[in-house]
Structure formats: C-alpha cells, structure tokens
C-alpha cells in the first residue's frame, strides 16, 4: 500500500473472512439481560497519561463564562484574529467546486507542497523535494504525534526539552516509548546535556525533540545551535524533530532560524511548521513536515492507514495564504510585539520581573517571590482567575521545570491586556 492510494488493507478479522455457514450457527445470547453491564477496560497507553493539568483552570473559566463574567483570557495560544479575507474568499470559492469533495491525497496536493518548498527556499535558503521531502499534515500536532508513533516503540527513548509543550512528552508516551527531559533554559547547557545523555545511556536515545522559539519558555536560538545539533545527531545516530510552530512570529528584527538550514540537517531529521499561528488559521488544521525522506515516508505510511488527507478546498486556500499574505503575517507579528510590550511594561510596573521574549505568542513570567513562597503555581493561577478574572496557564502544567512561572498568551488586544494588568494588581493587593 502507498500513502497515496488511500486503500485500507483487509483486516484479518474482517467479516468477509468468516464463512457464512459458520455465521448461521453462532449462538444468540437470548438469556443475557439487555441491561447487562461490563467494565470498559481502556488500553494501558491511555491509563499511563496523567490527568490534564489545565482541567481545573478550564472548568472554572467555563463556569465564569456561563455566568456571563468577562474574563481576560491569556490561557491558550489560540489566535483571536482572523486570516486575511482573500484566504477566506478562496476557501469559499474552492468549496463551490464540485470536484474537491472527494478524499484527497494523504500527503497533500502537489501545488501546496511546492508552495511550502518555495517558502523554505525563499526564507531559509533550504532546497526541498516536494515529492519526497515534504508532507501536509492535519495541523503540526497531528503530524508530530504520528511521527512519534512512526519512529518510537517500547524500549526507545526520546530527549524532550523541559519545561515541555505537553504533546512533546505525551506523543512519545503514547508510542509506548520513554522520555528524558532536559532543561532548555540555557542552550549551551542543554546541548552538552544532550551529548552527555547520548554518551552515557544504553541503549542510546533514539530521538531528540526540539522546539524554538520554545513554548512555553520562549527561549530562542541562532543557526549555530542547530549546526551543533546536527553534529551531535550524526555522532550518536540520533534522529531529530524540530517543532517550528512559531517560525513566523518574531520581534525586533529577529528571524528564528530553521533547523533544516544547517548543513546535513535533512540527513538526521525533520521540521514541522504550521499555518495555525502566523497565519491565524489554527482551526483550519494545516501543518507541514519537511526534511528527511525516510522519516517522512514512515509518517506517510502511518497516515495512509489513519487518515484520508485534508479537504482540498482548505489546501487551495492555504496556497493562496502562503503566496499572497506574507505582509499580513509580518503585520500580525508586529501586533504580537506591541501586545508583548504592553504586557511586559504593565507587569513590571506593578512590581513583577518579566523578561521580554523575542519571538512566539507568549510571556513566560516568573511569579513574584512573595507569592511563590505562599502558594503553589496552580493555586496562584487559580487565584488570578477566581478573584481577578484573568486566565493564564500555570507553568507547572508544563512539567516540574515550569514551576514558579505563568505562561501568558498574547491573544487579547492591547486595551484588554492593560485591563488584565489592572485586575491582577487589584487581585493581589
Ligand atoms: C510548540 C507547538 N507545537 C505545535 C502546536 C500545534 O500546532 P498545530 O495547530 O499546527 O497543530 C502548538 C500550538 O499551540 C505549539 O505551541
């Protein structure tokens, strides 16, 4: 089977395999009461997952909204601005074409892959073969998760940055593999810890997961960092996945580098990008995987079994967005930059000590010392929501390395961010 045929092989237990004469003699369980109940036993891989850390916050947020309260919501990195009108119009026009409604190619239509290849060439000087080195995913999170499933299994280990974006850890866990998390805050230390772990551990880690600009810590790197990663990966036969979700949102002239622009990167790894953030198309579910052809082939094989590709009208509109809305993406970045300034200035004015990130959609704000000593990170975030009507993500939801921090998404407008700071001040005074 190839990923393009979308043919599902027959299951060995398919009903076609059951002889019809056997079927006639199957006993009918007339004597079992229709209300007979049995315990639903879910798989170990589901039981291994920890409780959802943002559940408490989300429940309270939901209750407050239902009660009609106005909450300043900096919780989720969910863009609140729409995509450009011409992209929406293109979607409507493409959807009116009767030929686009069937199943699509599971690796994406060729013109979309070509458009992504041309963006990589123009922006990063990276040459990609759209046939074998590029794949369209139903959002980068879907592609990332299935890539982990394609590469990892019991006994394998992945190195994950800490604090972690939850799927970086749980996609590995869902693939029944192990995670080693290494602190991402100091990039030199992170690199040397990766090399040390590869040197000392047996069997060696198989996969390194990177994410710059990093969510949640906002750490960024330069190209040299990836040059060193490629050297380490080649030395220790370590595959690399770079999650480049915030490629398009950067401030003060900084341009986040692509992992694939380092020499030899495509020999060892892939990179995921998305239209969710810079293009304000999060609900559309469009992501891309680029780089190592063997890893992409493995992802294509898995996806060939799981999905039938993306609605073609969405792909046609995505081409339009990539081709025509570069200026709007830059403008969106400067909107985030202004929001960043408003929130950093506001929090620092009320006595916090917040660093200014140079990319991404978040502030990673340390909770003031006084409050860190008094209560847990989760309780502090709950206090802001309960008494201040401000929703943030507690850093502890991103693992122990996030303790003492809050992640604040820049998805409210400047006026509401100012209001949010006032509410935080009142709530804590
Ligand atoms: C680091 C990171 N990767 C991936 C994603 C998900 O992106 P997508 O919408 O393309 O699945 C997010 C979304 O918040 C993210 O922060």
Image (cartoon, grey):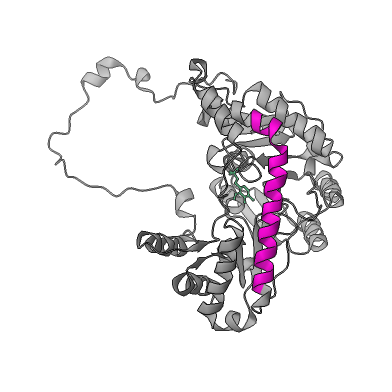
- The residue positioned 52% from the left and 78% from the top of the image is 426
Lateral position of residue 208 relative to residue 314, left or right: right
Residue 102's spot in the image, x, y percent?
49, 19
Residue 311's spot in the image, x, y percent?
52, 27
Vertically, is 234 above or below 90? below
Vertically, is 250 above or below 316? below
User: Which secondary structure is most common in the magenta stretch?
Assistant: helix
Residue 279's spot in the image, x, y percent?
64, 41
**Can residue 370 be seen at all in this image of the molecule?**
yes
Q: Quadrant of residue 262?
A: top right
Q: Nearer the viewer, residue 202 or 129?
A: 129
User: Which residues, given as a range, are shown in magenta?
Assistant: 320-347
Quarter the N terminus occupies: top right
Q: Is residue 229 magenta?
A: no
Lateral position of residue 102 relative to residue 149, left or right: left
- The residue positioned 29% from the left and 50% from the top of the image is 39
**Can residue 211 be seen at all in this image of the molecule?**
no
Tell me how many marks there are. 0
Residue 49's spot in the image, x, y percent?
49, 55
Lateral position of residue 314 relative to residue 227, left or right: left
- The residue positioned 44% from the left and 24% from the top of the image is 11
Quarter the C terminus occupies: bottom right
Q: Is residue 329 magenta?
A: yes
């Amino acid at each position: 089977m190839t990923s393009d045929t979308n043919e599902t092989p027959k299951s060995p237990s398919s009903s076609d395999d059951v002889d019809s004469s056997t079927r006639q003699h199957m006993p009918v369980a007339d004597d079992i009461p229709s209300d007979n109940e049995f315990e639903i036993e879910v798989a170990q891989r589901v039981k291994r997952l920890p409780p959802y850390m943002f559940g408490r916050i989300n429940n309270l947020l939901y209750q407050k909204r239902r009660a009609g309260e106005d909450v300043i919501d900096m919780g989720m990195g969910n863009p609140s601005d729409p995509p450009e009108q011409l992209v929406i119009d293109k979607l409507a026009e493409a959807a009116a074409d009767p030929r686009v409604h069937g199943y699509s190619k599971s690796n994406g239509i060729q013109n979309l892959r070509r458009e992504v290849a041309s963006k990589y060439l123009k922006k990063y000087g990276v040459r990609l073969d759209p046939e074998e080195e590029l794949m369209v995913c139903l959002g980068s999170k879907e592609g990332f998760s299935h890539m982990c499933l394609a590469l990892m299994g019991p006994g394998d280990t992945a190195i994950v940055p800490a604090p972690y974006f939850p799927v970086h850890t749980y996609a590995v866990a869902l693939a029944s593999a192990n995670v080693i998390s290494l602190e991402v805050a100091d990039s030199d230390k992170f690199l040397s810890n990766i090399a040390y772990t590869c040197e000392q551990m047996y069997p060696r880690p198989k996969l390194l997961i990177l994410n710059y600009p990093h969510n949640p810590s906002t750490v960024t790197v330069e190209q040299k960092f990836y040059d060193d990663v490629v050297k380490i990966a080649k030395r220790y036969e370590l595959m690399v996945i770079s999650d480049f979700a915030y490629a398009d949102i950067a401030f003060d002239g900084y341009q986040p580098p692509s992992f694939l622009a380092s020499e030899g990167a495509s020999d060892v790894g892939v990179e995921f990008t998305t239209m969710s953030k810079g293009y304000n198309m999060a609900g559309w579910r469009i992501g891309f995987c680029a780089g190592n052809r063997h890893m992409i082939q493995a992802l294509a094989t898995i996806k060939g079994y799981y999905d039938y590709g993306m609605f073609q009208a969405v792909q046609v509109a995505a081409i339009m967005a990539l081709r025509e809305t570069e200026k709007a993406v830059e403008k969106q970045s400067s909107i985030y930059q202004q929001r960043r300034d408003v929130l950093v200035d506001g929090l620092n004015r009320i006595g916090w000590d917040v660093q200014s990130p140079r990319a991404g959609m978040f502030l990673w704000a340390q909770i003031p010392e006084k409050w860190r000593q008094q209560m847990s990170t989760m309780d502090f975030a709950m206090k802001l929501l309960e008494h201040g009507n401000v929703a943030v993500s507690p850093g502890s939801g991103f693992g122990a390395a996030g303790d003492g921090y809050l992640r604040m998404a820049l998805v409210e407008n400047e006026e509401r961010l100012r209001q949010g700071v006032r509410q935080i001040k009142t709530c804590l005074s």
